[in-house]
Image: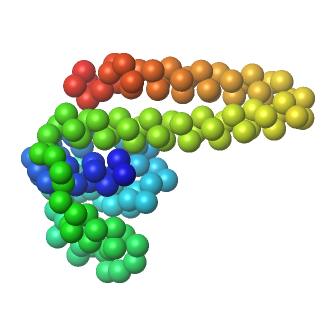
Amino acid sequence: MAEKKLLQLIFGNVDLQDDLLPLCEEDDFAGLAGEKIFTIILEEFRCGRRVTLEGLNRRFEDGEDQAFIAQLALEKLPEEPSLEKAEDWLNTLRKERLKVRKKRILAEIAAACEQSDSATSDRLYLDVVAIDRELLQISSGKNSLKSA
């Protein structure tokens, strides 16, 4: 849901792209349904071009991405596009990505413990601590777009 809302905000106010996209990282969208769409948006932005729904629609001939774009175009955004709303949705995406990564690492820690591999589990625990720190920064607003 966060990725769809973020895309709708980006397309609801193309001027927002100038403020938001320089702060986005490719990792923010890794593994998402709209990953290819976000990649194109970031590539076009880095080349100095803004992306519209119509332009994206032309890039995708068919398939899931085309259906996703069509769904974005059909659904109306309930709120007024703003940088604050975009920041909220981007931070939500970042938190979701970090939580998935943390869950994967915790499973790796469990496997390392079963194999009595304390070196690996210790290293992975440090990764979990780093993720927890990043989640705390996002939640406290220290990693927000406003303070960037």
Residue in the image at 26% along x and 29% along y: 145
Residue 43 visible in this rendered orientation of the protein: no
| Residue 78 placement (x, y as % from top left) | 18, 51
Task: State left or right for residue 142 relative to residue 131.
Answer: left
Task: State left or right for residue 99 relative to residue 32.
Answer: right
Residue in the image at 54% along x and 23% along y: 132
Picture quadrant where residue 39 is located: bottom left
The image quadrant where one finds the C terminus is top left
**Whether residue 39 is situated above or below residue 136 in the rendered picture:** below
| Residue 18 placement (x, y as % from top left) | 15, 43
Picture quadrant where residue 141 is located: top left
Residue in the image at 14% along x and 40% along y: 82
Residue in the image at 26% along x and 71% along y: 70
**Whether residue 137 is situated above or below residue 48 in the rendered picture:** above
- How many numbered tags mark residues here? 0
**Whether residue 17 is situated above or below residue 8 in the rendered picture:** above
Taking depth in this image into account, of 63 and 71 the one nearest to the observer is: 71
The structure's colour scheme is rainbow
Residue 84 visible in this rendered orientation of the protein: yes
Taking depth in this image into account, of 79 and 24 the one nearest to the observer is: 79
Task: State left or right for residue 78 relative to residue 123.
Answer: left
| Residue 26 placement (x, y as % from top left) | 39, 46
In this view, the residue farthest toward the front is 78
